[in-house]
Image (cartoon, helix red, strand yellow):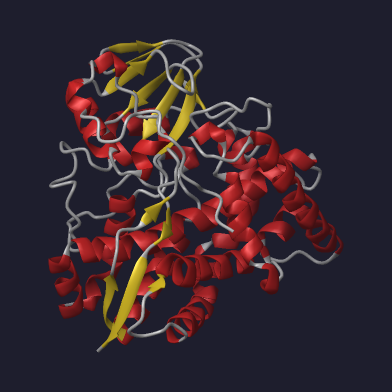
Amino acid sequence: MSIAVSKEADVPAGQDPWSIPIEKLDVSDAGLYERQEHWEYFKRLRKEDPVHFVEDSEFGPYWSITKFHDIVFVDTHHKEFSSEPTIVIGDSEVGFTPPMFIAMDQPKHDVQRKAVTPAVAPMQLQDVEPLIRERVGRVLDSLPVGEEFNWVDKVSIELTTQMLATLFDFPFEDRRLLTYWSDVSTSAPTVGGTMSEEDRKAELEKCLAYFAKLWQERAEAPQKNDFISLMAHHPAMRNMEPMEFLGNLMLLIVGGNDTTRNSMSGGVYALNKYPGEYDKLRKDPSLIPNMVSEIIRWQTPLAHMRRNATEDVELGGKTIRKGDKVVMWYISGNRDEEVIDRPDAFLIDREKARHHISFGFGIHRCMGNRLAEMQLRILWEEVMKRFSFVEVTGEPARVRSNFVMGYTDLPVVLHKH
């Protein structure tokens, strides 16, 4: 049920970004990410024009913020840089932008976020850890040894979808619908995806109809700690308009699914690309928690977040005008040579590995970051108990998007100890 399909890229494949006039350098083309050609573009921007204005792009004029500390500045100055009405680079041509709390400013953002946070609170995670471990073990034990399969489908999607079903208390037999709706959510033309806004709207209306029934059931039952029940019983959210309910569903589904699943795939790919790190891991599995942070930095599951300037702001010697679109490229900030030593390398014993930008900063920092780290930690603890090598046997297929840094296919073969 994958949504992402390749289309002709706007930027010719293999173009040298150092040969393009700097004012024409545009990192919004989704084909760059699908082909993994974006790295040199960002390297040049960080070096020559870290606060970079693009006059003309597929998504209109926008500012690229590419260095770590500049991104943190934008992310933490909520009054000067608004999250409304959307956190992605493009604007919907059909006006289909369901409100969600990540794309809201204070005070409404804080109230809605607080309402659903108990589902991923530390005590809740402690309770759910044994369940995650049991499921991870069951999935890993079901995998074929010595024959090729797609890690994305059999492991990354399966594990994250099971977790999402728990967080929503969603019918387990229908859990793959969550994956599908997550892919629909993130395949919009507003991020360079290939699904039309009309088709996307139609599919997400089915999502809304399905969840509306669950909402009704939860509203009539005593409150529990799943996302739907928490929203249905919270005074600030129980009377949401349908589109706002859909927006928050999309946020929680994508937040709980895409980021973790692509880090689960990215970690396998990184260890194969850097076999010396895999050797370190085999010798010392206690490095796993640190490695998890390095995977999340190295992969950077969401490439960007957008803000809109509410007033004129000076940044990096440039004046960002009120009303301008400002795009924080997390994927570039995580490779900032001035902040991170050897940033392109994958180092599982990296010092201060948690000093990355993948979860964002400020009021919009990812509320499920501890859950994501826990799922990845448990996965690798259980993998190391069972297998000497998860061998990548071919290049991965990637999602066409300038937002989600995703994999659709990662062929692997498992080797036992």
Of residues 127 and 175, the one drawn nearer to the viewer in this rendering: 175
Outermost right residue: 220
Q: Residue at x 63, y 36 (%)?
A: 196
Task: Give left or right: position of 410 versus 163.
Answer: left
Of residues 188 and 382, the one drawn nearer to the viewer in this rendering: 188
Above or below, comparing residue 391 to residue 21 in the picture: below
Outermost bottom residue: 417
Of residues 392 and 303, the one drawn nearer to the viewer in this rendering: 392
Q: Residue at x 18, y 46 (%)?
A: 343
Q: Residue at x 48, y 11 (%)?
A: 322
Above or below, comparing residue 283 to residue 408 in the picture: below
How many numbered marks does the figure carry?
0
Q: Residue at x 51, y 48 (%)?
A: 4
Task: Give left or right: position of 346 versus 292.
Answer: left
Of residues 85 and 15, the one drawn nearer to the viewer in this rendering: 15
Whether residue 132 can be seen here: yes
Q: Position of residue 285 (x, y in %)?
A: 23, 77
Above or below, comparing residue 274 to residue 196 in the picture: below
Q: Position of residue 125 (x, y in %)?
A: 51, 69
Q: Position of residue 262 (x, y in %)?
A: 42, 57
Task: Give left or right: position of 72 versus 234.
Answer: left
**Quadrant location of residue 314?**
top left
Quadrant of the image containing the C terminus: bottom left
Q: Position of residue 8 (x, y in %)?
A: 43, 35
Whether residue 234 can be seen here: no
